[in-house]
Amino acid sequence: MKDISNIMSNTLLFNSFAHIPIGWIWVCEASKIKKKKIHAFNLMGREIVVFRGENNELGALDAYCPHMGAHLVDGKVEGNSIRCFFHNWQFNQQGLCIDIPCLATMPAKKITTRSYFIKEQYGLIWLWTGETQPEFSIPCVPALQDQAIDYSLGNQWQKKCHPNVVMINAIDENHFQTVHKLPGHILNMKPITIDHTNIHFENQGRPTANHWAGRLLQKCYRGAITYNMSYWYGLVGTVTVGPDFLQMHLMFALRPEKGTTLGKTIAFTKQRRGLIGKLLNRCLLQLTKVVGWYFAVGDTKVFQKIQFAFNNPIKNDKAVIAFIKHLENQSRVQWLEPTMKSEFNYET
Ligand code: FES
Ligand SMILES: [Fe+2]
C-alpha cells in the first residue's frame, strides 16, 4: 500500500463544515410542509424558505426578499407563489418576481431571487445544493434499484461531529469487534468506485469456523457475509445487511448543522403484495430500524466527545482512506457566500 500517513494533508471536504458538496440534502419530513404553508430553515448556515403551493408542489427560495431583505416566512402563499409581507412583492416557485402591487407595470428588467431544486422522496424533502439543474437523482439502495419499495422513516438524531465522521463508522472494520462485539475478522470491505459521486464497499469477509458464532453464521451465508455500503458525496449512505434469506436495507441521510450532524434513518424493503405481505413488511421495517438503532447507539459516547483527527492511519483503515479519497473528488459549492449580489439598479 502506498504511503498513507499524510492522507489528511490535502483534504478540503472531508470533516469540513466550511465546504458543502453538490448533491441532494435532506431538509425535513415532507408531511411537515402543508399546502399553502411556509417554513423557514437554516440549512447549513443559509436561511431558506420552503413552501407548498395550491398545486401541491414545493418551492424553495432564499429566505430574504430581494427588495429590502424582509424574511419571506412572514409572507403568505398565494396560488403557487409566495407574497412578501413587507411590500407585498410576489415570487413564483422559480424565484421570479411576478407582481409589485405599487407599480402599474412590472419593470423591464426581471427581478429574481435564488430558487432551489427541491423534491419529495422516501417521505422526506430533499434540496439540491448545486446552482444548476440536478446532475443525478436522489440516491437509492442499490440492491433495490428498479424495484417497487416500501419504506419507513426513523427518528431524527444528532451527533456532535461532522457527518463524514459518522459515515465512516460503517466501514471502520476494526471497531465492529471492539465496540459492537462482532466475532473475528468477518469484515473486509472492498471499495468499488461507481462514479465521481458514488462509491460502494462490498464485504469480502466470510464467517470463520473457529468460533461458535462463525459456525452459526456459516449456515446463513453461502459466500461472504452480506454487508454492503454505498455512499454519495459523503452525506448519504445506504447499508444492506443480513442473511441470504432476510436482507435489510437502511439509508442514512445526514447534513452538517452548526458543528454537529443532523441525521435521519430510513428503512427499506421491497414491496410485498397482499395482507400478509404488508404485515411482513411492517415487521421487517421495524426490525431493520432496531438493527440500525443497535449499531448507532453503540457508538454514541464516541460521537459525543470525539475531536476527529486521523493522524496515524494504518493499513486496516484502508476502507476509510478510500472513502476520504473519493470524497475529495466531489464538486462543491460556495454555500456560505451570500447568493445575492446587491445591485443598485432602479428604474426612474
Ligand atoms: S422587502 Fe419584500 S417586498 Fe419589500
Ligand atoms: Fe459503529
Image: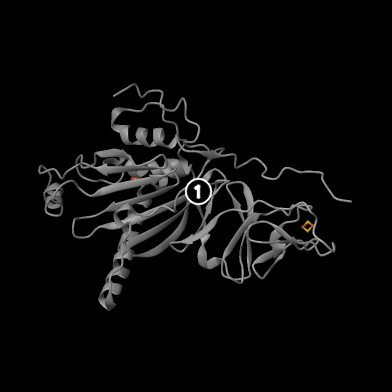
Residue type highlighted by circle 1 = Arg
Q: Hey, which residue is sitting farthest right in the picture?
A: 348
Q: Residue at x 27, y 40 (%)?
A: 189
Q: Hey, which residue is sitting farthest bottom in the picture?
A: 275
Name the foreground residue: 71 vs 144. Answer: 144
Q: Is residue 11 left or right of residue 206?
A: right
Would you name the residue on which mark 1 appears? 255
Q: Position of residue 282 (x, y in %)?
A: 32, 70
Q: Hey, which residue is sitting farthest top in the picture?
A: 3
Q: Is residue 300 left or right of residue 336?
A: left
Q: Is residue 276 left or right of residue 10?
A: left
Instruction: Judge the density around disc 1: few (<14), some (14-19), many (≥20) Cα neighbours within 10 Å.
Output: many
Q: Residue at x 54, y 43 (%)?
A: 259
Split into 4 quadrants, where in the image is the N terminus? top left
Q: Residue at x 78, y 63 (%)?
A: 88
Looking at the image, residue 158 lies above or below residue 178: below
Quadrant location, ligand no. 1: bottom right
Looking at the image, residue 11 lies above or below residue 69: above
